[in-house]
Image (tube, rainbow, N blue to C red):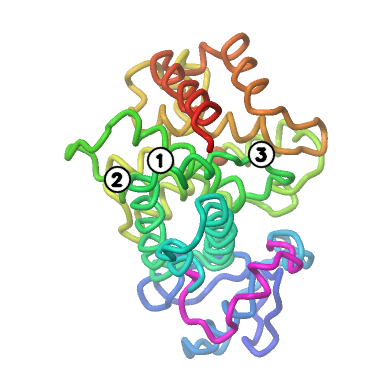
């Protein structure tokens, strides 16, 4: 059901439709679920007096469901007056020459999670551009600091929030790309990194109740979830972000080498190399993260399962290179 509502009465969790063309307001789309006070403020500042409220798509618990837990130290440390979604601490940690590799990796991980959480709350073109700058710094760190990047692979997570998962996949896929491409000029590592960190951006368009459902999804819910690669691609297309090749990461990261993936059932080399890299990192992180319906696996158990039961999902050579990363990680830790 739709009704007109005064912008003074907007609340988090309302699904609103703006009565303007997308280029006349600061949001990526004309209609969306309000997830933060900043979005309400932006709507007011745009001079819009009334919007259309879709009560059916509204979710009045949205505020709690999609946000990072406020107890996370990096979240509370974020300056409230900050105008960028990139925490100052991220760049400070990256460039702090006195931080030991393990501590640096820990700080970079925490601040990266905050950065992506901020973006998912408000994925405007401006915020995506800011986050791309932060990701470029993280990519440079991984490319130039072997010790810290080894610790960044310590990613077994106790949650499966989209922002935590996005950061894990970013670290893993950039590390695999570093091993594959060395320092080849043929690949734009900053764009590539952005594609990996933002691969699940389309999940901001999926109902929070589905994203955070404790348990397996029904067929209908799964059908909605399977829209996220297309939605993410569209969002990046509309905001003119990422190269054509790197947008394919977002579109193709659930395709499988045997052709049984989604959304398009592409197979073998029809899946872009970057999409094939991302799919390995994506599955690995899902297996090594705690889910409500199963226990997480340790990295080597996850690699074993991927090799023995899922190898047809992946490009075999890429998978072997991914395994080597962990061998190197295991052998190379000081
Ligand atoms: Fe995904
Ligand atoms: Fe993912």
Judge whether residue 282 is colored magenta: no
Asked if labels 2 and 1 touch by Cβ distance under 8 angstroms, the answer is yes
Judge whether residue 79 is colored magenta: yes
Measured Cα–Cα span from mark 1 to mark 2: 8 Å
- Residue at left offset 47%, top offset 27%: 328
- Residue at left offset 23%, top offset 38%: 183
Q: Is residue 314 left or right of residue 212?
A: left
Question: Which residues lie in the magenta part?
Answer: 67-87
What residue does disc 2 label? 189
Name the image quarter holding the N terminus: bottom right
Residue 272 locus on image (x, y percent): 33, 29
Specify the farthest residue to the left.
185
Measured Cα–Cα span from mark 3 to mark 2: 24 Å
Measured Cα–Cα span from mark 3 to mark 1: 17 Å
The residue closer to the viewer here, 307 or 264, is 307
Residue 232 locus on image (x, y percent): 47, 49
Residue 119 locus on image (x, y percent): 52, 64
Earlier residue among tags 3 and 1: 3
Specify the farthest residue to the top.
308
Q: Secondary structure at mark 3?
A: loop
What residue does disc 3 label? 156
The residue closer to the viewer here, 107 or 245, is 107
Please, what is the dominant secondary structure of the magenta stretch? loop
- Residue at left offset 75%, top offset 35%: 217
Earlier residue among tags 3 and 2: 3
What residue does disc 1 label? 174
Q: Residues within 10 Å of mark 3 (few under 14, many from 20)?
A: some
């Amino acid at each position: 059901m739709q009704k007109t509502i005064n912008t003074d009465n907007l609340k988090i969790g309302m699904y609103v439709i703006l009565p303007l063309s997308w280029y006349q307001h600061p949001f990526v789309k004309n209609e969306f679920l309000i997830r933060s006070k900043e979005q309400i403020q932006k709507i007011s500042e745009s001079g819009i007096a009334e919007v259309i409220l879709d009560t059916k798509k509204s979710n009045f618990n949205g505020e709690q469901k999609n946000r990072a837990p406020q107890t996370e130290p990096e979240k509370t440390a974020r300056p409230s007056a900050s105008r960028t979604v990139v925490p100052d601490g991220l760049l400070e940690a990256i460039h702090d020459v006195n931080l030991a590799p393990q501590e640096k990796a820990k700080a970079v991980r925490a601040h990266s999670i905050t950065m992506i959480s901020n973006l998912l709350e408000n994925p405007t073109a401006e915020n995506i551009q800011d986050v791309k700058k932060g990701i470029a710094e993280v990519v440079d760190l991984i490319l130039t600091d072997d010790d810290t990047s080894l610790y960044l692979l310590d990613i077994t997570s106790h949650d499966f929030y989209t922002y935590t998962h996005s950061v894990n996949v970013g670290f893993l896929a950039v590390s695999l790309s570093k091993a594959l491409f060395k320092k080849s000029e043929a690949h734009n590592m900053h764009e590539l990194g952005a594609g990996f960190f933002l691969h699940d951006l389309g999940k901001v368009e999926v109902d929070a109740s589905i994203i955070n459902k404790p348990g397996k999804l029904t067929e209908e819910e799964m059908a909605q979830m399977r829209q996220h690669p297309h939605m993410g691609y569209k969002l990046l297309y509309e905001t003119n972000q990422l190269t054509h090749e790197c947008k394919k990461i977002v579109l193709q990261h659930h395709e499988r080498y045997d052709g049984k993936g989604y959304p398009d059932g592409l197979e073998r080399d029809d899946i872009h190399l970057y999409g094939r890299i991302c799919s390995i990192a994506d599955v690995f992180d899902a297996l090594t993260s705690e889910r409500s319906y199963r226990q997480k696996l340790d990295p080597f158990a996850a690699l074993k399962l991927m090799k023995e039961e899922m190898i047809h999902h992946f490009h075999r050579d890429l998978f072997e290179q991914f395994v080597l990363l962990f061998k190197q990680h295991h052998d190379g830790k000081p």
